[in-house]
Image (cartoon, rainbow, N blue to C red):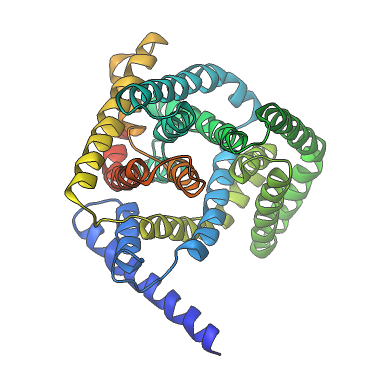
């Protein structure tokens, strides 16, 4: 009974804290994501310590991100993804490579940091928040705008790059990077082949359920497809979010897509909210003046540096000045994969705490700021 009581108390604290924080943000015209992050900061181990550990929250939050990527996949078809290949593998690859390379060189030159640690930090800085961007873009109806499509394309490549960076991290600890890369490619091919084989059956099942009008069946189908594909992706050495996105694409054609998306949205929104609360619990706002000065430097680099870099890359690829700046500001913040990479690298001893701690702080603050920045940049005049 004690464990149950503890769980009920934590749930009440989280829901109550999130309600108050989101209500305050709504009153002042701020995005709900900011409220969730603030709630996480306040109830977490670095706030009032009402929740000792955000790890359990992160598990529920990851399910929310999986569902978010699944519903994003519903908006795409394979043909549309192929049509976006220039932005995914052109703009996305350029953004990740240049940001990571520039950051790595600066760290190796100015701080004499080992190149392995510098590359991991550079990769973390290159990441933006897929969950934050998608939720905000969807909220303002900007997913179908040019700047929205470009941002999504870059975020998709970032998710792929995050998996590759984790392979690189493991290789730095002694395993073979070549073996890791081979496993990654084999896993990607295997997942694609499995989903292509199941595509017709999944679409037929979705259409049948849509014709019955049974909402419970539609909910169970959507949850089953998203979660089982995510598990399959993890087993193949891939990101669960990438697996869920691919599954969404497989049933993205026809009227069934609208039914599945409608029924899964309440689960998605609630769990994505928990995800951002879990991110907030990781943000340590205390610390010395030196940590805050370093965090401020990282914050300027994350926001202004990335906005300028994305703008320049898009101008090189022929986009207009307005679209380039809008997309640049949408991506000008840190992300959950960046937080994860820095945390993992610090835990393994590859990244020293005096570098990782202020960077984690800057990544979190940038996400807190990003909700409003993305909203402003995404809106059409």
The answer to whether residue 161 is above or below residue 232 is above
Residue 335 image offset from top left, x and y in percent: 41, 41
Q: Image quadrant of residue 40? A: bottom left
Q: Image quadrant of residue 24? A: bottom left
Residue 6 image offset from top left, x and y in percent: 48, 82
Residue 97 image offset from top left, x and y in percent: 47, 21
Q: Nearer the viewer, residue 220 or 341?
A: 341
Relative to 165, is 228 on the left or the right? right
Q: Residue at x 32, y 29 (%)?
A: 111
Q: Residue at x 66, y 53 (%)?
A: 227
The answer to whether residue 228 is above or below residue 102 is below
For residue 381, say whether it is visible.
Answer: no
Q: Nearer the viewer, residue 191 or 184?
A: 184
Relative to 210, is 272 on the left or the right? left
Residue 243 image offset from top left, x and y in percent: 65, 41
Relative to 28, is 359 on the left or the right? right
Q: Nearer the viewer, residue 286 or 326?
A: 286
Quadrant that contains the C terminus: top left
The answer to whether residue 8 is above or below residue 184 is below
Q: Residue at x 77, y 49 (%)?
A: 205
Quadrant that contains the N terminus: bottom right
For residue 119, say whether it is visible.
Answer: yes
Q: Image quadrant of residue 165? A: top right
């Amino acid at each position: 009974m004690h464990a149950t009581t503890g769980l009920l108390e934590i749930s009440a604290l989280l829901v109550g804290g999130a309600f108050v924080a989101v209500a305050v943000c709504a009153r002042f015209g701020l995005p709900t994501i900011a409220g969730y992050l603030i709630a996480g900061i306040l109830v977490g181990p670095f706030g009032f310590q009402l929740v000792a550990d955000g790890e359990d929250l992160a598990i529920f939050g990851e399910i929310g991100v999986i569902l978010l990527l699944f519903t994003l996949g519903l908006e795409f078809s394979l043909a549309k993804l192929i049509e976006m290949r220039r932005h995914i593998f052109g703009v996305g690859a350029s953004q990740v490579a240049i940001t990571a390379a520039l950051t790595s060189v600066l760290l190796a030159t100015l701080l004499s940091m080992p190149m392995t640690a510098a590359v991991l930090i550079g990769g973390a800085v290159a990441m933006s928040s897929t969950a934050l961007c998608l939720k905000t873009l969807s909220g303002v109806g900007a997913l179908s705008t040019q700047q929205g499509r470009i941002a999504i394309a870059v975020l998709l490549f970032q998710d792929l790059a995050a998996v590759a960076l984790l392979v690189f991290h493991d290789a730095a600890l002694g395993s073979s990077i070549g073996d890791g890369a081979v496993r990654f490619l084999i896993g990607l091919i295997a997942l694609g082949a499995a989903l292509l084989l199941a595509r017709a059956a999944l679409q037929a099942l979705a259409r049948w359920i849509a014709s019955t009008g049974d909402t419970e069946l539609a909910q169970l189908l959507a949850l089953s497809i998203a979660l089982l594909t995510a598990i399959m992706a993890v087993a193949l050495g891939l990101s669960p979010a990438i697996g869920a996105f691919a599954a969404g694409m497989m049933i993205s054609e026809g009227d069934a897509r609208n039914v599945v998306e409608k029924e899964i949205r309440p689960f998605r929104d609630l769990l994505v909210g928990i995800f951002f609360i879990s991110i907030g619990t990781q943000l340590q706002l205390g610390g010395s003046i030196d940590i805050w000065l370093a965090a401020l430097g990282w914050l300027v680099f994350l926001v202004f540096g990335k906005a300028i870099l994305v703008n320049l890359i898009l101008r090189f690829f022929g986009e207009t000045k307005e679209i380039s700046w809008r997309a640049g500001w949408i991506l000008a913040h840190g992300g959950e994969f960046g937080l994860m990479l820095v945390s993992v690298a610090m835990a393994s001893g590859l990244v020293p705490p005096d570098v990782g701690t202020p960077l984690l702080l800057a990544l979190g603050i940038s996400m807190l700021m990003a909700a409003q920045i993305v909203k402003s940049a995404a809106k059409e005049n």
